[in-house]
Amino acid sequence: MSELELESWNRPPVVDMDGDLLEVAMGPHHPSTHGVFRMDVALDGEKIVKLKPVFGYLHRNHEKLGEGNSYLASMPYTDRLDYICSMTNNWAYAVAVEKLAGQEVPERAEYVRVIVGELTRVQNHALSVGFLIQDMGASGTPLMYAFKARENILDLFESLSGSRMMCNYFRFGGLRVDPTAEWLDRTRQVVAELPQFVDEFEQLLVSNEILMARTQGVGVLPKELARNAGATGPVLRASGINYDIRKVDHYGIYDRFSFKVPLGEHGDVYDRFMIRLLELRQSIEILEQALKDIPGGPVMDPKAKIRNFRPKAGEAYGRIEAPKGELGFYLISDGGPNPYRYRVRPPSFVNLTTLEDMCLGHNVADVVLILGSIDIVLGEVDR
Amino acid sequence: MTSSFAENLDQIFVLLKHWIVALVPVPLQPLVGAVLSVAAIIVVFATLFAIAVLMERKGLGRMQNRYGPNRVGPLGILQPAADGIKALIKEDVVPYNADHVVHFLAPIVLVVVVFMGYAVLPIGRNMTFVPMDAGLLFYFAMGASAELSVFMAGWSSRNKYSMLGAMRAIAQMISYEIPLLMTSVIVVMMTGSLSLDKIAEVQNQYTWGLPHWFVFTPMGFAAFVMFAIAATAETNRSPFDLPEGESEIIAGYFTEYSGFKFAEFFLGEYVAMLSISGLGATLFLGGWSAPLEVLNVVPSWFWFVVKIMTAMCVFIWMRGTLPRLRQDQLMNFAWKFVLPMTLLDLMVAGLWRFMGEGILRWVVCSAILLAAYVIGGRAGMKREQFGPRSYRYAE
Amino acid sequence: MLGEGILKGLAETARNFAGSFVSKERLTTVQYPEERAPAIEASRVFPFLVYDGPEWEAGLRCVACQICEKECPPKCIYIEKSKDKKPDYVGKLQIYPARFDIDVSVCMSCQICVEVCPFEAIKMDTEFELATDDRFGGLLHDRKSLAKSNEYYHTIHPTEAAEVDARLAEEKAKVEEKARAAAAAAAAKAAEAPKSEAPKTGEGTEAQ
């Protein structure tokens, strides 16, 4: 059998002549790698000695397509970046373009943006925790409960924007459709039922000894490493660093809502998933406040252009606190209808760089949990 | 001597067998009798396997707030038949480098060995196929042979994942054999016999309408709990199903099996579950005896089937709820918690005998076991530093 | 006590198990295809072309302006203009599309074509059972299969269709109003014409 000449990125991580280390490739076809993702792992017995993540299996040329399409035409493509949280992807892109073009957003639109953004955060965290437990082998029971709660939110998105996941709802300077009073009432009902779901979920999980044994002390991410690696979102906050872009940048109207930012101490898998559950509860707080205070008015400036939208030449970086971390869009405009450069800063990609350091010394069984706790979506990592 | 209808119903299979055997000429009678019993065991427990598989899928579905399979036949009753046909018509893929002979033999060994275990289980009154004096010993010999087939499967596949899975499975099964054995020894101590029918008969006495099942004694209850944990680990069920890891190593030691060989492994696993539930029912839950004295009109084999199906329901319930333990935690749990508790339980069983009749021995034995469990549990958690945590919020 | 969390988890699962037999809100499965989930009005699947009146070719609202073709992000629309013209809903002669193909396997249901169409001619359908076994031609929908009537539009998106109809009726009323005003002005001018002889030619040229 002839040896294939593999490129450097495709070669296994260690060329081991003695045969002491077992080299295993986990993925890309794997039930638990959250997408088409490969990890080349070198094992000493059951302990991990070296881990190399290989991704790019879902690369779809998003950034190059952005250069060929107009600004509006890139909006549906941003839905498909982090395909679970399409609304927040739209929001980050809209923030970037509004910064570039110097557009203002009406107040009602800002409130609705907060409502759909926080609903997205709720369903993302529920899904992420559900999948983490599924990877642990609970044969999908908590996952099904999370999905049931998520279905209500997706039904709301469908009646508002027309589609459950690929919403394409935000526009530059506002939103596409004004939610009706009936939709707001239904949202209030859904939000009223959410605390019960979170309580049931917590009862099933939080004091479960097996869960604690599997997740506490596993995959510790030290504070300094998290900060230096550029990790953001729940991964960073679980390691103890207080950095939430909603509080730092004051984008939108987040100043008007009172909510707290939970912080972890140990930075292990248990902390990361508990932080997500606590953030879910805080999102419910924000939702209740926003639904109470939402004013009337238009959601889009009637003079804002849909076609032939040509912002002035310049550059802008717009970022928001997406459920997975800091999602940023960097746009350079040369005055034409298409951007000159369109760059996405995906949170999952940057958080993924800490994977090897977190996994060294642990078992193969823990790698799956650690990967699940970073909460990656391959659409974002590969774009 | 008029036998009542209830007694006849109770002994119906025995009477049927005697009637059929009487039709055959004398020299052939033992052979025909044996063949009949074997056929009956295989048919009955294969049917129970089909029912158990269906129960599992529908039970898991209901726990997850969805229907289970309900398209094939009303309420999905014919789903096991559909699964069987599917398994038969699938292409049998054997890796090129695999050791073909061992690869072929592994599932066969598993199925044969687990069915042999049924030879000594008392399925009803007078209904043990081979009433041996050392029936328990024979059962454990067969159980240990099942581990052999697991290793044969992992080794012959020449696949890293399968090897990993097989190693894990062997380590797990060997570690949990010891608590399994020791807890059975407690029952043997209390009965004084290794024969399973004698153990079942001893528990068939009633006081104030309640039976003398061993699970109602303090050390019997502790032994039953530990037997249940060890049984779950022996049959590779959740939360101890790391060998067939699914999320991590796809299917562990039977990754390279497809089609009917995979169905044989599946059959072997479920029949082993039914078999070990049968052993647990015999040792601790009275085998074929009814829960209350008045219910003796219902046939004994019916109670046995009810008890093993209830045990299956508990297995399914645990599978639907609990995440799985990691390999080293599993082994730690076995050697550092379950084994010392079993030894303590043995000593308490001796103490029970020693103390003589009366309420005092109940109180003392329960107190010792409870204290050991609570203290052991706390110490274990504290050493590993597990515990619920509280979180602070940023200012 | 060791095992307490596990017991709580088991209790939770048992509650869900029992509840799924009793309450409909625990067991939310919809037995497709015998039952359907309740249709949500705003949902969008793939586009279709609206036509008014009983005949699809005559009543097609599309005037082949090709704006949707330009704005479509994955470029799944292909339009060819016709050589002749036909009257639209206000009676003006417009060109129409001789070919209007949408490749449904490329379309990503983003609804931008609907948003930019100035003539309310293309709207989003809710039909999703479009599976076919013809991989190459079966998913390329042409003008005939895309044309659906305005009544159909009312059945799938009632509020939207009502708004569109109101807007179109308003447009039509405005056009008719202008036409009537122009006709009235022309009639008034024609009535005044015999009174003055000299500025007749000047007014004649002005009235053109």
Image (tube, rainbow, N blue to C red):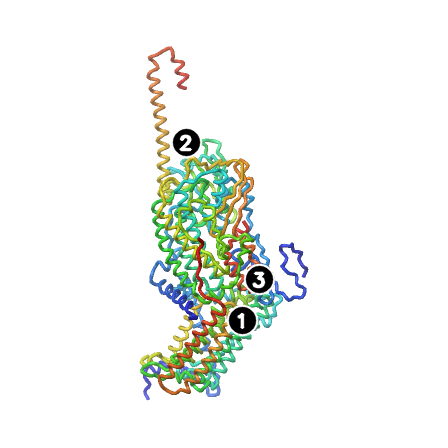
Which amino acid type is marked by label 1?
Answer: Ala
> Residue A23, how many percent across, how many down?
61, 63
Badge 3: residue crowd in 10 Å (few <14, some 14–19, many ≥20): some
Residue on which the image places disc 1: B169
> Residue A230, how many percent across, how many down?
54, 52
Question: Along the line of sight, which residue is nearer the eye, A303 or C124?
Answer: A303
Which of the labelled discs sits on residue C87, or is there none?
A: 2
Residue on which the image places disc 3: A360
- Same-subunit check for callouts 3 and 2: no
> Residue A116, how many percent across, how many down?
41, 48
Badge 1: residue crowd in 10 Å (few <14, some 14–19, many ≥20): many
Residue at the spot 35% in from the left edge and 15% down from the top edge: C193
Chain bearing tag 3 is A
Instruction: Give the number of the mark in front: 3 or 2.
Output: 3
Instruction: Give the number of the mark in front: 1 or 3.
Output: 3
- Same-subunit check for callouts 1 and 3: no
Question: Along the line of sight, which residue is nearer the eye, C54 or A181?
Answer: A181
Chain bearing tag 2 is C
